[in-house]
Image (tube, rainbow, N blue to C red):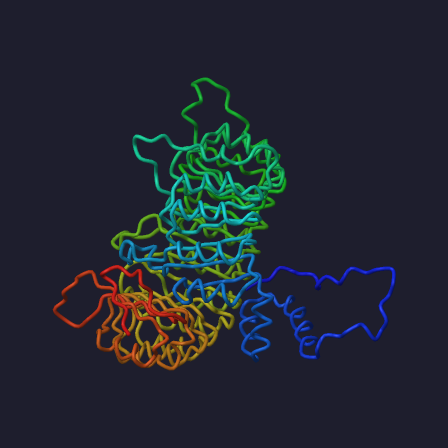
C-alpha cells in the first residue's frame, strides 16, 4: 500500500496575547508517542512494510490504520467491505482485485462472482472523500458506475482492468458527474454494446464544458464508434492530457488531427493504423510523420490495430525517444520491424507478436541494449504448427539485452541450452515466463526434459519472483525450484511433473510463495496436504484438472478454517470423488454468499 504525503496536524490559531505557561497543557505521554508514530508512518510507502509495521503491537496497528490513505485488496473475498472500511478510515485511493487470472482463459463459470456492488455501497458510506479507484477482474454494472459518479465529489481517477458487466451509460455517468476527473482508463474490459434498436450514446460529449483536468484517457477496449468531433473538442480543451489510447474505430487521418491538437502527449495508443474509408481516391495523403515529429514528448507507443505496414514509417520521428513500444496487435514481419527497431536505442519495454520471427529478435538484441521487459505473443496457438520463434531468438536476446528483468516468451520449441544461456547472461531477471505451446515437449535437440533449463533459471537468477514453466518437466525441475527459488512469489505450472513429490518440493521449499497456479498436472491430495504449514501465508492456490478429491480438500478445510476452499464442477452429479477445479484463498470473513450452483465452498 502506498501513501501520499500528508502534512503535520494544524496548530491552533495563534493570538497576539500569549497564554501563561501554567495554562498550556501538554498531551499525555502515550498520545505524544502516538502522534510521533503517525507522522513517521506517513513516510512508509511500501504496503509490505506497512503490513509488517501493523503487526508490531496494538498501538502500531491502530496508528498504521489511521495513516493509510492507499489501500490494496488483492482478493475481494479475502475481507469484507465492512471490515476493510471499519479498520482503514482515511482511505483516499483503493485497489480491489476480483477473479483469479484463469478467468482470462474461460476456466471460470459464467457469473462466478467478484461483484463490485457490496464494495460500492460500503465505499459510498465510509469514504465520501475517495479520489481513486482501481478495479481488476471485477463485475460491475452501470448502476455501480452511477453510484461512483455521484458519491465522491473529489473523485479523480477510475481504472478498470479486465472488468465486465457495464456499458456506455455507466461510462457516460462518470464522465458527466466527476468534474475533477484526471484518469479514465478502460483496459481490456468488456464494455456491453447497446441493443440493436438503440443508438450508441455519445459518452465523449458528456464531459463538462470548458477546460478539463484529464491527464489520461484510455478506451481501446470500447467496441463501438465514438463521436470524433466530440473527441477532438475534448482533446483540444484538455491541456494536461498526457496519455491517450484510442479504439480501432479511430482512423489514422483522425489520429493525425488529434496529435496536432495534443502535441504534449507522452503515451499514445494509435487505434486503427490503416487507410480510412473516408479518404476519397486521388486525395493527397496526409503527412503523418509530421504529427509524430510534433509530439516531441512521446515515450510510449501502442495500438496499431488493423495495421497496414506501409504506414509504419510515419512513426520514425518518434522512435529515438521511445522507452516503450507495444506491437502486440501488429502482424508485422522482420523486414517491416527492422527499420523501426533500429532507431529505438532507448527502448526499455517491447511487446511484439511472434510474426517478427527469430530474425526480428536479432534486430532487437543488436539495438535495444537497455531493454528491461520483453513479451513475445503467439499469432497462432495450434500445437501442430511450427512456430516462427525458437531457442535461437531467446538466446540472441539473452546475449544482446543483458539488462533484461522480465520476459514472457511463447514458442513451439525450446532447448535447455538456450534457457541456461539466458540464466547466465541475464542474472537480473525478476520475471521469467516461458510458454512452450504443446504438451510435454522435450528439448528438441537432446530429447531430454527441460529440467536443467528451468533449474538454471532459479539457480542463477537470484532476484526471481515470478516463474512460469512448461514443456516436458519431471519432479527434478520442481526440486530445483524448491531448493533455489527462495524469492519466488508467483509460480504457474501446466502439464508438468511426475508425482506428488514435485509439488511437495515447491510447497516445502519456497517460503515466499504467494500465488500458485497449476493445471493439467498429476498432483493429488498428498501433495496438497504438504502445504498445510504455508497456506495461511499465501494469497491463493488454483488447481484444475489435477488428481484432487473432494475428501482430501475437505480435510484441508477442517484443518485450516480461515481458508476458503471453492470446489468448481461443471457436472452437478458426478459419479466419482475427483474435482475439476480447486480455488483456495485465505479469508478473514465467512464464506461468500453469492457463489453460483456449480461452486461448493467447503467448511
Q: Quadrant of the C terminus?
A: bottom left
Q: Quadrant of the N terminus?
A: bottom right
* Above or below, comparing residue 10 to residue 326 in the picture: below
Image side of residue 23 versus residue 173, left or right: right
Q: Residue at x 43, y 27 (%)?
A: 276
**588 or 475: nearer the eye?**
588
Image side of residue 192 versus residue 553, left or right: right
In the image, residue 583 lies at what x, y percent?
31, 67
Q: Residue at x 35, y 56 (%)?
A: 411
In the image, residue 427 lies at what x, y percent?
52, 68
**521 or 560: nearer the eye?**
560
- Quadrant of residue 348 within the rendered picture: bottom right
**Which residue occupies the extreme right position in the image?**
17
In the image, residue 73 lies at what x, y percent?
46, 63
For the question of whether residue 434 can be seen, the reply is yes
Q: Residue at x 60, y 41 (%)?
A: 213
For the question of whether residue 448 can be seen, the reply is no
* Above or below, comparing residue 56 to residue 420 in the picture: below
In the image, residue 361 lies at what x, y percent?
46, 52
Amino acid at each position: 500500500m502506498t501513501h501520499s504525503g500528508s502534512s503535520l496536524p494544524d496548530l491552533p490559531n495563534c493570538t497576539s496575547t500569549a497564554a501563561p505557561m501554567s495554562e498550556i497543557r501538554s498531551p499525555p505521554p502515550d498520545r505524544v508517542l502516538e502522534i510521533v508514530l503517525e507522522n513517521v508512518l506517513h513516510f512508509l510507502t511500501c504496503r509490505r512494510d506497512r503490513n509488517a509495521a501493523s503487526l508490531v503491537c496494538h498501538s502500531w496497528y491502530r496508528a498504521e490504520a489511521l495513516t493509510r490513505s492507499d489501500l490494496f485488496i488483492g482478493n475481494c473475498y479475502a475481507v469484507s467491505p465492512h471490515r476493510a472500511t471499519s479498520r482503514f478510515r482515511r482511505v483516499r485511493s483503493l485497489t480491489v482485485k476480483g477473479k483469479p487470472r484463469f478467468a482470462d482463459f474461460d476456466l471460470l463459470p459464467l457469473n462466478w462472482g467478484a461483484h463490485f456492488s457490496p464494495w460500492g455501497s460500503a465505499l459510498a458510506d465510509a469514504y465520501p472523500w475517495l479520489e481513486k479507484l482501481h478495479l481488476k477482474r471485477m463485475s460491475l454494472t452501470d448502476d455501480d458506475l452511477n453510484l461512483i459518479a455521484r458519491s465522491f465529489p473529489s473523485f479523480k481517477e477510475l481504472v478498470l482492468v479486465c472488468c465486465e458487466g457495464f456499458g456506455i451509460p455507466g461510462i457516460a455517468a462518470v464522465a458527466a458527474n466527476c468534474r475533477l476527473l484526471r484518469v479514465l482508463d478502460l483496459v481490456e474490459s468488456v464494455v456491453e454494446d447497446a441493443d440493436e434498436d438503440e443508438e450508441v450514446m455519445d459518452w465523449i460529449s458528456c464531459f463538462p464544458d470548458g477546460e478539463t483536468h484529464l491527464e489520461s484517457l484510455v478506451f481501446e477496449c470500447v467496441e463501438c464508434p465514438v463521436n470524433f468531433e466530440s473527441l477532438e473538442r475534448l482533446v483540444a480543451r484538455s491541456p494536461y492530457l498526457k496519455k491517450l489510447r484510442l479504439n480501432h474505430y479511430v482512423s489514422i487521418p483522425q489520429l493525425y488531427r488529434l496529435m496536432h491538437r495534443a502535441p504534449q502527449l507522452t503515451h499514445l495508443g494509435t487505434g486503427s493504423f490503416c487507410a480510412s474509408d473516408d479518404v476519397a481516391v486521388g486525395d493527397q495523403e496526409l503527412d503523418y510523420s509530421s504529427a509524430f515529429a510534433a509530439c516531441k514528448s512521446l515515450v510510449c507507443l501502442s495500438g496499431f490495430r488493423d495495421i497496414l505496414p506501409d504506414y509504419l514509417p510515419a512513426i520514425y520521428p518518434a522512435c529515438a525517444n521511445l522507452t516503450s513500444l507495444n506491437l502486440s496487435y501488429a502482424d508485422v514481419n522482420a523486414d517491416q520491424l527492422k527499420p523501426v527497431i533500429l532507431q529505438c536505442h532507448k527502448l526499455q519495454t517491447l511487446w511484439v507478436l511472434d510474426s517478427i520471427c527469430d530474425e526480428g529478435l536479432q534486430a532487437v538484441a543488436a539495438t535495444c541494449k537497455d531493454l528491461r521487459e520483453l513479451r513475445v505473443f503467439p499469432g497462432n496457438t495450434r500445437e501442430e504448427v511450427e512456430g516462427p520463434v525458437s531457442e535461437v531468438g531467446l538466446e540472441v536476446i539473452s546475449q544482446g539485452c543483458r539488462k533484461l528483468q522480465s520476459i514472457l516468451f511463447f514458442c513451439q520449441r525450446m532447448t535447455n541450452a538456450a534457457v541456461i544461456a539466458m540464466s547466465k547472461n541475464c542474472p537480473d531477471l525478476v520475471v521469467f515466463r516461458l510458454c512452450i505451446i504443446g504438451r510435454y515437449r522435450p528439448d528438441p535437440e537432446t530429447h531430454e526434459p527441460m529440467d536443467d533449463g528451468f533449474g538454471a533459471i532459479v539457480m542463477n537468477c537470484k532476484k526471481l519472483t515470478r516463474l512460469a514453466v512448461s514443456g516436458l518437466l519431471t519432479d527434478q525441475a520442481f526440486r530445483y525450484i524448491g531448493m533455489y527459488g527462495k524469492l519466488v512469489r508467483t509460480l504457474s505450472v501446466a502439464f508438468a511433473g511426475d508425482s506428488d513429490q514435485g509439488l511437495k518440493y515447491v510447497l516445502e521449499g519456497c517460503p515466499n510463495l504467494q500465488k500458485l497456479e497449476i493445471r493439467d498436472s498429476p498432483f493429488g491430495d498428498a501433495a496438497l496436504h504438504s502445504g498445510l504449514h504455508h497456506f495461511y501465508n499465501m494469497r491463493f492456490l488454483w488447481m484444475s484438472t489435477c488428481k484432487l478429491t473432494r475428501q482430501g480438500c475437505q480435510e484441508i478445510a477442517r484443518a485450516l478454517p480461515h481458508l476458503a476452499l471453492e470446489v468448481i464442477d461443471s457436472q452437478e452429479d458426478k459419479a466419482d470423488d475427483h474435482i475439476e477445479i480447486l480455488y483456495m484463498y485465505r479469508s478473514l470473513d465467512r464464506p461468500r454468499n453469492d457463489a453460483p450452483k456449480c461452486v461448493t465452498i467447503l467448511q
